[in-house]
Image: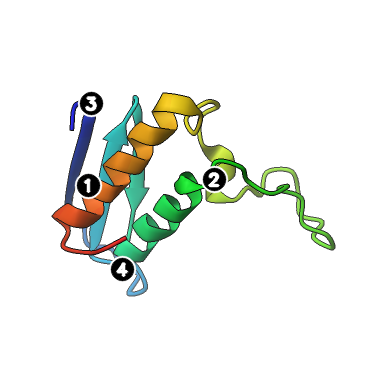
Amino acid sequence: MWGAMVGGGPRPLKRDPLLEEWAYFVRVNGFTFEFVSVDQIREALEYCREKVHPARRQPGITLEHYWQRWFERLPKGLLRGKKRDEVVAALERALSELGATG
């Protein structure tokens, strides 16, 4: 697919045993997604496939303004129109190259 790169590599060894050993990268439309598991890629693909997203406010949660979920940090316009289609195709390609299904 033109304009998208998929890759991965071992993470540098750290002292934290909870960290995964691999990081997966998907670059599309000038933005690089970083994932630590195939399940995260699936979750992102599921989110990106939706054209309309529900309201982001969560009742009863009063966190500080700097607490954001991963999809709230995406660049504006990345999930609109043709760009959204390219992101979905890149994430699907990543799953197929990793031998996973989405």
**Residue 53 point in image, percent of width and height:** 63, 46
Q: Which mark is residue 58?
A: none
Label 3 or label 2, whichever lies nearer to me, is: 3
Q: Disc 4 vs disc 2: Cβ atoms closer than 8 Å?
A: no
Residue 69 relative to residue 3: left or right: right
Residue 49 relative to residue 24: left or right: right
Local SS, label 3: loop
* Nearer-N-terminus badge (1/4): 4
How far apart, in angstroms, are the residues tagged by discs 3 and 2?
21 Å
Q: Disc 3 vs disc 4: Cβ atoms closer than 8 Å?
A: no
- Does residue 32 lie above or below 61 as drawn? above
How far apart, in angstroms, are the residues tagged by discs 1 and 4?
32 Å
Single out the residue that lies furthest toward the bottom: 17
* Nearer-N-terminus badge (2/1): 2
Q: Where, quadrant-wise, is the C terminus in this rendering?
A: bottom left
Residue 49 relative to residue 86: left or right: right
Q: Disc 1 vs disc 4: Cβ atoms closer than 8 Å?
A: no
Q: Which mark is residue 15?
A: 4
Residue neighbourhood size for the residue with mark 4, other residues' Cα within 10 Å, grouped as few (<14), some (14–19), many (≥20)? few
Quarter assignment of residue 41: bottom left
Question: Residue sitting at 63 percent across and 47 percent down?
Answer: 68
Residue bearing the label numbered 2: 71
Residue 52 relative to residue 43: left or right: right
Residue bearing the label numbered 3: 3
Q: Which mark is residue 93?
A: 1
Label 4 or label 2, whichever lies nearer to me, is: 2
Question: Residue sitting at 22 percent across and 47 percent down?
Answer: 93
